[in-house]
Image (cartoon, rainbow, N blue to C red):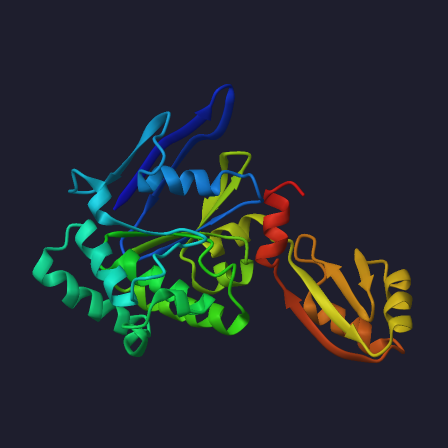
């Protein structure tokens, strides 16, 4: 287990991160979410040791020097363009404490794992953005860290590259614990065990997606009408807490009213043409907007 207690960072009179505490269970993926300036990168920088906290502590159970147990992929990884992928990853392995004779073997292993087996002897200057992200992942995991920290790991990638990296992270989760910052909420919704919401340097909400949804969701029905006119007429005549968006109407559920059967009966008795009726929950984006106060 990884425990972060009262992590705080101040610059002069400005507090950028304030008393942030959370725990990470082994082999889980946690998303650090927040608007720009919320303190996500500063928090990750303190966890890696690149930035000394003003106060607070980071502990990994059974580990004295946590730096050897951390792998880090910054948002914009930089490489020596004259080195090959294998040379760079082998160097990273040695710097992370992997013994010399084993460093090359481990570098070859992780480069194959991230899909760069055929490119490991090419210079990094020739790599595309997606290949560089894979190489960054390789250097972060070559020493088999207990905690993998990723700062916006897919933000600079196209949809295909983002999908490839997300699939890679799912595999890595079987071997290590992952904490990553992101503003791509669909990705967080897909693979995250725990959500940590930062706002103005403070941890304002945390929990699993199910737990956070249960707290913030506003259950409602979504009704798809054939025409926008029908949607507007139903909204004005229904005497329900309903709002129209084009040809779609959202009906708020208050104390489990109306029941789905009651809503269907009302629609069946009306003259409106309907294509779909379903109960929906709040998206992570909607929850984010509520938590962030936007």
Residue 264 appears at what percent x and percent y?
75, 73
Vertical position of residue 179 compared to residue 123: above or below: above
Residue 273 appears at what percent x and percent y?
84, 80
Q: Is residue 144 visible?
A: no
In the rendered structure, the answer to whether residue 293 lies left or right of residue 134 reads right
Vertical position of residue 259 compared to residue 207: above or below: below
In the rendered structure, the answer to whether residue 202 lies left or right of residue 178 reads right
Query: How many labels, in total?
Result: 0
Please report the residue visible at 44 percent of the width from the left and 38 percent of the height from the top. Answer: 42
Q: Looking at this view, is 170 or 161 the one in front? A: 161
Q: Looking at this view, is 157 or 18 the one in front? A: 157
Please report the residue visible at 33 percent of the width from the left and 37 percent of the height from the top. Answer: 4
Q: Which quadrant: the C terminus?
A: top right
Q: Which residue is most to the top?
A: 13
Please report the residue visible at 34 percent of the width from the left and 38 percent of the height from the top. Answer: 50
Q: Looking at this view, is 86 or 50 the one in front? A: 86
Q: Looking at this view, is 115 or 179 the one in front? A: 115
Q: Is residue 283 visible?
A: yes
């Amino acid at each position: 287990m990884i425990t972060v207690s009262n992590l705080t960072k101040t610059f002069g009179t400005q507090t950028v991160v304030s008393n942030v505490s959370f725990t990470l269970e082994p082999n889980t993926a946690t998303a650090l979410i927040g608007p720009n300036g919320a303190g996500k990168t500063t928090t990750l920088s303190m966890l890696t040791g690149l930035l000394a906290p003003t106060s607070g502590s980071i502990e990994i159970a059974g580990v004295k020097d946590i730096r050897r147990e951390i792998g880090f992929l910054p948002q914009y990884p930089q490489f020596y363009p004259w080195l090959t992928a294998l040379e760079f990853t082998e160097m990273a392995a040695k710097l992370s404490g992997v013994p010399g004779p084993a460093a090359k073997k481990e570098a070859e292993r992780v480069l194959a794992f991230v899909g760069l087996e055929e490119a490991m002897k090419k210079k990094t200057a020739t790599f595309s953005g997606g290949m560089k992200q894979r190489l960054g992942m390789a250097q972060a995991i070559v020493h088999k860290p207990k905690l993998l920290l990723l700062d916006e790991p897919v933000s600079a990638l196209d949809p295909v590259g983002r999908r490839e990296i997300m699939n890679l992270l799912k595999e890595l989760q079987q071997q290590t614990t992952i904490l990553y910052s992101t503003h791509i909420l669909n990705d967080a919704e897909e693979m995250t065990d725990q959500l940590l919401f930062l706002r103005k340097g403070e941890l304002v909400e945390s929990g699993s997606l199910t737990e956070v949804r249960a707290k913030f969701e506003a259950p409602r029905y979504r009704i798809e009408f054939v025409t926008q006119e029908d949607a507007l007429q139903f909204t004005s005549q229904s005497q329900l807490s309903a709002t129209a968006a084009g040809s779609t109407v959202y009906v708020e559920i208050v104390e489990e009213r109306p029941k789905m059967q009651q809503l269907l009966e009302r629609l069946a008795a009306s003259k409106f043409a309907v294509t779909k009726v379903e109960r929906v929950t709040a998206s992570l984006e909607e929850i984010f907007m509520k938590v962030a106060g936007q």
